[in-house]
Image (cartoon, rainbow, N blue to C red):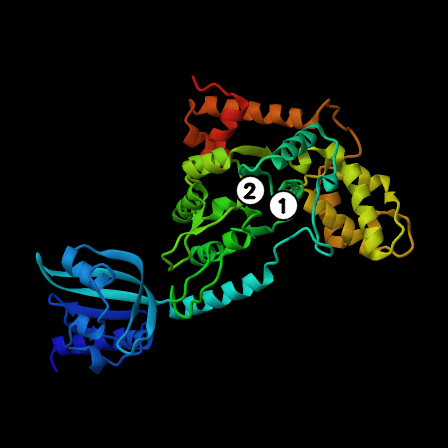
Amino acid sequence: MNLDQILFRASKNILDTIEEGIHIVDFNGISIVYNKAMEEIEGLKKNQVIGRHLLDIFPDWTKENSTLLTVLNTRMPIFNREQTYLNLKGKRISTINTTYPIFEEETLIGAVEIAKNLTAVTDMTEQIIELQQKLIKPVKKELGIRQYHFDELIGKNEKYQEAIKIAKRASNSTSSVLIYGDTGTGKELFAQSIHFASARQNHPFIAQNCAAIPDSLLESLLFGTAKGAFTGAQDRPGLFEQADGGTLFLDEINSMSMSLQAKLLRVLQENYVRRVGGNKDLPVDVRIIAATNEAPEVLIESGHMRKDLYYRINVINLRIPSLNERKDDIPFLVDYFIREYNDKLDKDVWMLAEELQNAFKVYDWAGNIRELKNFIESAMNLITDEHVITKEHMPSHVLEVLLLKSKYIQDDVIEVDDLNVHLQNIEKDILKKTLAYYYNNVSKAAKHLNISRQNLQYKIKIYGISMD
C-alpha cells in the first residue's frame, strides 16, 4: 500500500468519526464523499448518494436553497446558513451549513459542505413553543388574576413621582412606550399599570422577556408559525395575535438580534404580522410597551439597538430611577412589604430594628426593589412571634452582604446634603482627571477606568464634560 492509499484511508476513517456531516461533490455536482454523520442527518445511505447528482437525490433543491449548488455557481464560500429541505424519502431536514469551493490552482473542481444537524432542535423548538404558549396566560381584567395598578407604585421620591406622572399620561394614549430602568426597578409593574388604566384594560396584557431566548424560538413565539414552517410545525398564533386589542410588553428588547428587530419594526409600522413560514399578512391591533435595562443611547451607539426601532417605540419615554437614587423611599417600601408578608405569612411584624434601618440607608441596592423585597421576605420567614425584624432574623448570607459588604459606618460619618450628588461629583472629577491625563483619548481612559468605551462616552455626555 502506497502513501496516497494510506492517507486516503486515514482521511476516510477520520471523516466517519466526526460529528458534523460532510458532503463533497465534484464540479458537476456529483457526490464523491458522504460521511456517516451526514447519513444520520439525512436518513440516507452512501450507496444512495455517491456517484449521483445532487438534484437526483434532492429534487426540490435549487441554486437558491442549496449551499452546494450555490457555491458551485458563485465560487464563493457560504458560512453558517440555515437550510431546510426534503430528502429522497420526503423527510424534512434542517441543518446549518458552511460550504467551501474546492480549487486546484485556479480551477474549480468541487465543493465541500459541513453540516450541523438542526432537525432535532427544530422539533424541540416546536415543542417549546407549544409548551410556552400553554403557560403564557394573557392577563385580563378578571377576578383571581394578579394585576398591577398605579396605587401599587410605592414612593414619594421626586424622580419616582415624575415617572408615575409620565406613566399616567401614557395610559391616556395608544402610542408605544419605552421604559428604561435597572433590573428589579419594577418595569412590568409600570407597564401593567399603564395597560389597566388605559382604554385597552379589558383586553389581554402579555409580557415576554426577550433575553436568553434563541432568535428562531423568539420569532416563532412573537409572530406564530404556519404549518410546515419546520419539522412538525403547526398553525399556531403568536403573541401579537394573542394580544390583539391589548398590550404586548417586551422586556429587554435590546436582547433581540438586529435582524429580528427589523422584523419587529415592520410589524409595528404596518400593523400586520406574518407567521413564520406563512404567506398571509394578518392584521393586529397591539400596543407595544418595551423595556431595556441599559441606557438606549448606549445601546444604539454600541450597535445593540436599531435606531429606526428606537425612534418607533420611543414615542413616550419613561425612566424609572434605581433604588439607590430614591433611598428616601426605603421606609415606605419596607412598611409596604412588611404588611404584604404579614398577610401572606400570618405574622404580626411592625418594623425594622434601628440597626437594619441604618444599614438599609447606605447599602448599595444592586438588585433594586426586588432585592429589598427579598430581604424582607427572607427575614419574615424566620420570625416566630416577634414584632421587630432584627439582624438575627436575616439569613446568614443576607446578613453578610448587608452588614459586612455595605458601606455601613457607625463612626465618622461624612455629612453631605445629597449623597447621590456628592458621588456624582466625585465620579465626574475622576473622569475629567483621567481624560486629561490621556489627552482626551477615550479608549485609553476607558481602559484605565475598566469600563467600556461606550459607557465612558455616555458618562461624558450626561456630565457635560468638555473634550476641547
- For label 1, the crowd category at 10 Å Cα-Cα, with few meaning under 14, some 14 to 19 and many 20 or more, is some
- For label 2, the crowd category at 10 Å Cα-Cα, with few meaning under 14, some 14 to 19 and many 20 or more, is many
Query: Is disc 1 placed on a helix, strand or loop?
Result: helix
Locate the C terminus by quadrant.
Answer: top left
Query: Is disc 2 placed on a helix, strand or loop?
Result: strand
Q: What number is the disc on residue 291?
A: 2
Q: For the point 73% across and 57% down, which residue is it?
A: 144
Q: Quadrant of residue 383?
A: bottom right
Look at label 1 and name its amino acid: Glu
Residue situated in front as seen by the camera: 8 or 329: 329
- Relative to 14, is 384 on the left or the right? right
- Would residue 450 be visible to someone looking at this image? no
Look at label 2 and name its amino acid: Ala
- Relative to 122, is 287 on the left or the right? right
Residue situated in front as seen by the camera: 199 or 14: 199
In three-dimensional space, the C-alpha distance between marks 2 and 1, rounded to whole angstroms, equals 9 Å
- Across and down, in percent, residue 321 comes to 64, 34
Residue 29, compared with residue 295, is above or below; it is below
Q: Quadrant of residue 29?
A: bottom left
- Across and down, in percent, residue 363 comes to 71, 39
Q: Earlier in the sequence, mark 2 or mark 1?
A: 1
Q: What number is the disc on residue 160?
A: none
Locate the N terminus by quadrant.
Answer: bottom left
- Would residue 136 be visible to someone looking at this image? yes
- Label 2 with label 1: CB-CB less than 8 Å: yes
- Residue lying furthest top: 468
Residue situated in front as seen by the camera: 1 or 267: 267
- Across and down, in percent, residue 292 comes to 54, 41
* Residue on which disc 1 sits: 188
- Across and down, in percent, residue 457 comes to 47, 29
